[in-house]
Amino acid sequence: MQNVIFGVRATMKPSLIVLLLSSVLLTQPGCRSLDTRADKAPVNKCQEDLKRIPEIAALLKPHIRADGEEDEKPLKGLEVALTINGMIRSQSNFDDDIDNSCESENTRENFEKLLNTLKQNNMPPTVDFLVGKLIDRGLLEIWLQSGNLAGNMTYSRVKARKRTAQDFLEDVARNDELLLELWKKFPPKQKYFRYPRLKLSKDEQNREEIKAFLKQKGYLDAPATIDARDRKFSELYCAAQARGDQDCVNLMKAKFKSLLLDTTL
């Protein structure tokens, strides 16, 4: 869940939010290997792994409710927009990532699952922020044909604060040229940009230079306000799937739902 790009003015049910985010739980590449010791009960180990996610550890702490506090705050009237960082690819490239368990989730089947879930829930056009070197052109065309949008997140996912303004903008421009070929077939009403890792340059002059370039190219900077933390969950989820631990998989789903609802509230 990210910042409002397309307003959805309605009562947002927790189940809808979780369903949508669960569909993109496995889209993030580059998962780290985890502790696979067999000297602990599987569920206990799974719970310990979950507690390594700081947000989960905080959520598990006892919460003392004030008098009159409701069990669940209403989400009525909340405007949200679902955005995605990184398209699912149609096949794996094991040379690119560390953990093959997560990389193997790059399948046409998972892409179709994501696309169908958005359609079934009547979601407005969803922006997928793309890193050019990882683009799957075939699936991207299907994504755009379905009415969804593509955003620019640089060609090689370089952080603005790690490069000079010139180096960073060259990487943005390279991705812009790649996307322009597709936008000729599927012209967007608005072009969106997102900084990799949401990291801006620390240098004020560089920041202004980058902002001016984005404005000149017609991009709207899209920040993120609600982070699903799905990348962290994916590390654990993929490992549990790989070892056939369905109890841990189910626990991941439950904790993911709880954290996402808590974060959204």
Image (tube, rainbow, N blue to C red):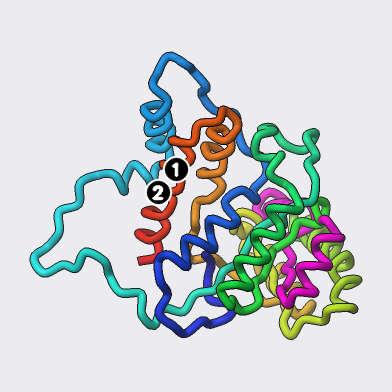
Residue at x 80%, y 39% (from the top left corner): 93
Coordinates of residue 200 in the picture (x, y in percent): 61, 60
Residue at x 60%, y 56% (from the top left corner): 24
Q: In the rendered structure, does residue 151 fall within the stretch colored magenta?
A: yes
Q: Quadrant of residue 179?
A: bottom right
- Locate the C terminus and report the quarter of the image it occupies: bottom left
Q: In the rendered structure, does residue 132 fall within the stretch colored magenta?
A: no
Coordinates of residue 18 in the picture (x, y in percent): 47, 60
Residue type (three-letter) at the residue carrying disc 2: Ala
Crowd band around label 1 with a 10 angstrom C-alpha radius: few (<14), some (14–19), many (20+): few
Q: Quadrant of residue 39?
A: top left
Residue type (three-letter) at the residue carrying disc 1: Asn
Mark number, residue 89: none
* Marks 2,1: beta carbons within 8 A: yes
Coordinates of residue 46 in the picture (x, y in percent): 42, 32
Residue at x 50%, y 51% (from the top left corner): 229
Is residue 253 or residue 80 the one in the foreground?
Answer: 253
Q: Quadrant of residue 210?
A: bottom right
Which residue matches tag 1?
Answer: 250
Kindly tell me whether residue 205 is visible in this rendering.
no
Mark number, residue 254: 2
Query: Which residue sits furthest left?
Result: 67
Q: Secondary structure at mark 2?
A: helix
Q: Secondary structure at mark 1?
A: helix
**Magenta region:** 136-163
Kindly tell me whether residue 58 is visible in this rendering.
yes
Relative to 178, residue 133 above or below: above
How far is disc 2 from disc 1 in space, using C-alphas? 6 Å
